Image: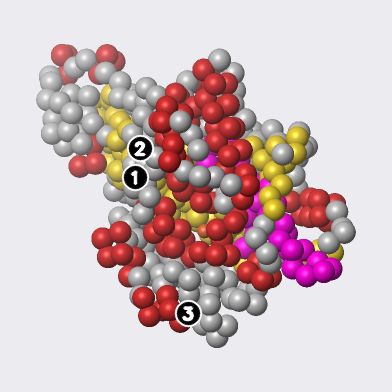
Amino acid sequence: MLSRDENQLLTRVGPDTPMGHTMRRYWLPALLSTELADADGAPVRVRLLGEDLVAFRDTTGRIGLLDEYCPHRRISLFFGRNEDCGLRCVYHGWKFDVNGRCLEMMNEPEERQFTSKIHITSYPTVELGGVVWAYMGPADQRPPVPDFAWTRVAPSHVHVSKVIQESNWLQGLEGGIDTSHAPILHRLINASSARPGFLPSNPFVRGKAPTLVVDLTEYGYQYAGIRNLDEASVHIRTYHFILPFHQIRPSTSERGVPLVAGHMWVPMDDGNTMVYNWEYSMTEALDAEDRLERRLGNGPADVDQATFRSRRNRANDYLLDRQVQKTESFTGIDGINTQDRAIQESMGRVVDRSREHLGPADKAIIQARRLLLEAVKTVQDGRAPRGVGPSYYTLRASEGVVPRDADWREILTPEMATAEILQTV
Ligand code: FES
Ligand SMILES: [Fe+2]
């Protein structure tokens, strides 16, 4: 549980809020590279931390991320012309380059143009792993660019998608670092069901309710859900949480290829989140079927690729089928991440955390809140928060059945590539 004040502190992300300031100390996913496929292509609207922005790729391939509204009379530059190394407002023809400099004013005679006095807000960007990242914080505090293991692999082996979640970002993150729900919410109740979810035979489902171990690190934490399977063995599933909103977890592709996967819950504003979903293979390349993400419900079949809104959504109760809920899956909703969005959106845009009743199974969530509150304080004190790099660069997650008396860290840590563990809670 959080007090109302703490809840507000962590969930409000606008420009003049403490969490907003904290978020602005990190590189943030702004959009997918594929949305800006062509030089001089159509500009794209971006909503990020309560700001309306517009992104474009100029003639030379550079990316601009500008305030959406023209500094002249405030029309939307989404309607602008992307031409000859700049974005031109169609109202009076003012033109801006990727750095926000005003280059021309078509409505003023040449000798009366005051271009050098006009600057539009622009944020630096970098393209890595198929994502355009933006830095919206103070220039002298800019951290090294993101360098996750998944942003380093060849495009043939990595896949990234995105989908809008109609809730505050923290509800998404708290679902992603909550292993205790996963084999419950996402389980199938029929061994022969072909629907997405964990089959009853899966050790994740067969295991008892988990005990959680959280190892604090410089980037956030790694944690393990330990589930007793039988007299001799336990099932262990490990995750990483990297501040402010990254989750890394073990996964498998539609065809059974082992993957490392994760999400980033990027705040659009206080009530909306852009969820980025990534996965990569360390062995064979991903194929077209893998990239459809049918199992998760994040691909083109389930998410409109123009608006990034899920076709199964709050307005249609996520196409919940009560018959399927009786006979096949725990929820009756198809798509593992669709199930996550359904229950997280059902909490309302910003859940009232002063009314919760947390237990030991919520330990990872409690720790994440502590770390986020600590990060806000750290930034207020003028220091760099956890997770700005570079200790997370190589992280992976893993899963396995190990003997009960074995040291699971010894077995799994090499696979997880964890940096130094600072403290275990
Ligand atoms: S409003 Fe953009 S040029 Fe006038
Ligand atoms: Fe989930």
The residue that label 1 is drawn on is: 349
214 relative position to 138: left or right: right
Q: Is residue 146 visible?
A: no
Q: Are marks 2 and 1 in contact (CB under 8 Å)?
A: yes
Magenta span includes 230: yes
> Which stretch appears magenta?
223-251
The residue that label 2 is drawn on is: 270
Q: Are marks 2 and 3 in contact (CB under 8 Å)?
A: no
Residue at horizontal 37%, vertical 25%? Answer: 15
Checking the image for residue 328, the label placed there is 3
Q: Nearer the viewer, residue 110 or 407?
A: 407
Q: Is 285 above or below relative to 388?
A: below
**Structural distance between the alpha carbons of marks 2 and 1:** 8 Å
Q: Residue flagged by tag 3: what amino acid is it? A: Glu
Choose top left, top right, bottom left or bottom right for residue 389: top right
Residue at horizontal 49%, vertical 27%? Answer: 22
Q: Nearer the viewer, mark 2 or mark 3?
A: 3
